[in-house]
């Protein structure tokens, strides 16, 4: 007998030893009969010719090959000679083994028991394959969910880096952000002589100084309950009193400004102490989120413009505040009056200087 798969041999041997009729055909990759054996006379297979297409010699094989899934079982097939047989197809390499097992009534009971065991084996194998596939799918799903969670946390962190937390939540709810705030204080601060000093040092030193300055602005904004709105070149813009209103917004932003100036004094840039010019004004503003792909949270209004003008008018290492901010600080807060000064686009403005 040519070498056949183990499960095929066990079936054939079982039928031989119990004097039952079993036969087999080996069909090669060209779908031709490559070998035949067993009780082929019992099934009327004696006339099959080796090397000839099996479908030309057995009509019931027409369209059956190639079989997409092996092993494959066709129960109770009526053969040309009048016999009834169970047909089993097994794959081995590029060949297919076709086993004929007697299914006549006198053998029906035992064959059904064997068929049940065979079907159970197939079901168990299919169950094992499905469980393995399910486990693989669950693992891939778990990894995908973990990846999505990481990306969500990363996106959430990035969003909170550019937006106040409450604004971020409203934006995620697809709410349009456009708010009026009646009372806030706005600050602008820039590095004195930044452009000239940056020319004399390398890019790494320049970036390091900016990183130091903006990092200090971030940390102090958390400490004093302010919001750093944005950076513009070497300038930082911050606000107190939004998105949640607070009555002491002027005091909070002045404290923030004093600490920011002290933080700058502890650093050197191009061989000289780092110094800032800071301006603060208090009043109403409009705040909102603009843009679609690269959105920003920004402030607009005369309060913003005047705070920027005060910063431009300030001397190196000086913090200038408007009269409106001074009145909110109360009479006990030490400030030096600077009188009225003409500011471009604003007119004459009364200003004060915070103590050095």
Image (tube, rainbow, N blue to C red):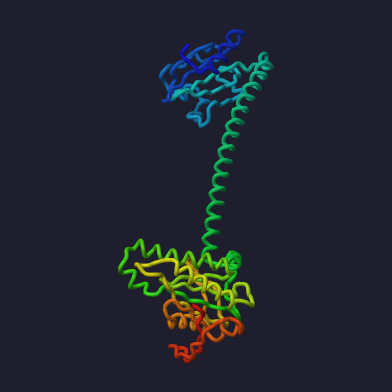
Asked where in the image residue 128 lies, by quadrant, the reply is top right
The percent position of residue 2, horizontal first and vertical second, equals: 46, 13
Above or below 287: residue 68: above
Give whichever of 9, 341 is nearer the camera.
Answer: 341
Give whichever of 313, 291 is nearer the camera.
Answer: 313
Query: Residue at the left extreme?
Result: 200
Above or below 328: residue 293: above
Give whichever of 170, 13 is nearer the camera.
Answer: 170
Give whichever of 71, 217 is nearer the camera.
Answer: 217
Query: Residue at the right extreme?
Result: 109
Residue in the picture at 48% in, 72% down: 261
**Count of numbered badges drawn on the protein:** 0
The percent position of residue 22, horizontal first and vertical second, equals: 56, 13
The percent position of residue 207, horizontal first and vertical second, equals: 39, 63
The percent position of residue 5, horizontal first and vertical second, equals: 51, 18
Q: Is residue 51 left or right of residue 16?
A: left
Residue in the picture at 56% in, 80% down: 285
Asked where in the image residue 135 lies, by quadrant, the reply is top right
Residue in the picture at 60% in, 65% down: 169
Q: Is residue 130 left or right of residue 310?
A: right
């Amino acid at each position: 007998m040519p070498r056949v798969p183990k499960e095929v041999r066990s079936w054939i041997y079982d039928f031989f030893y119990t004097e039952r009729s079993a036969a087999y055909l080996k069909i090669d990759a060209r779908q031709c009969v490559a070998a035949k054996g067993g009780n082929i006379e019992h099934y009327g297979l004696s006339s099959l010719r080796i090397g000839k297409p099996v479908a030309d010699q057995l009509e019931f094989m027409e369209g059956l090959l190639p079989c997409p899934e092996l092993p494959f079982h066709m129960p109770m097939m009526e053969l040309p000679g009048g016999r009834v047989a169970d047909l089993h197809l097994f794959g081995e390499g590029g060949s297919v083994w076709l086993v004929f097992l007697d299914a006549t009534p006198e053998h029906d009971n035992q064959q059904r028991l064997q068929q049940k065991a065979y079907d159970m084996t197939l079901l168990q194998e299919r169950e094992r394959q499905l469980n393995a596939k399910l486990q693989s799918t669950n693992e891939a799903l778990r990894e995908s969910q973990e990846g999505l969670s990481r990306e969500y946390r990363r996106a959430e962190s990035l969003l909170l880096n550019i937006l106040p937390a409450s604004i971020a939540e409203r934006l995620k709810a697809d709410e349009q952000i456009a708010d009026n705030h009646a009372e806030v204080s706005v600050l602008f601060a820039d590095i004195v002589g930044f452009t000239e000093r940056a020319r004399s040092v390398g890019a790494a030193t320049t970036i390091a100084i900016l990183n130091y300055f903006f990092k200090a602005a971030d940390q102090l904004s958390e400490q004093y309950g302010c919001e750093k709105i944005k950076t513009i070149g070497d300038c930082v813009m911050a606000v107190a009193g939004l998105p949640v209103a607070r009555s002491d917004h002027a005091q909070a932003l002045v404290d923030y400004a004093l600490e920011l100036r002290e933080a700058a004094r502890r650093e050197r840039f191009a061989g000289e102490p780092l110094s800032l010019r800071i301006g603060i004004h208090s009043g109403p503003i409009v705040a909102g989120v603009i843009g679609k792909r690269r959105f920003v949270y920004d402030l607009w209004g005369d309060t913003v413009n005047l705070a920027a003008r005060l910063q431009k008018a300030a001397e190196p290492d000086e913090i200038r505040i408007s009269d409106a901010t001074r009145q909110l600080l109360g009479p006990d807060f030490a400030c030096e009056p600077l009188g009225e000064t003409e500011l471009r686009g604003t007119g004459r403005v009364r200003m004060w200087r915070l103590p050095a």
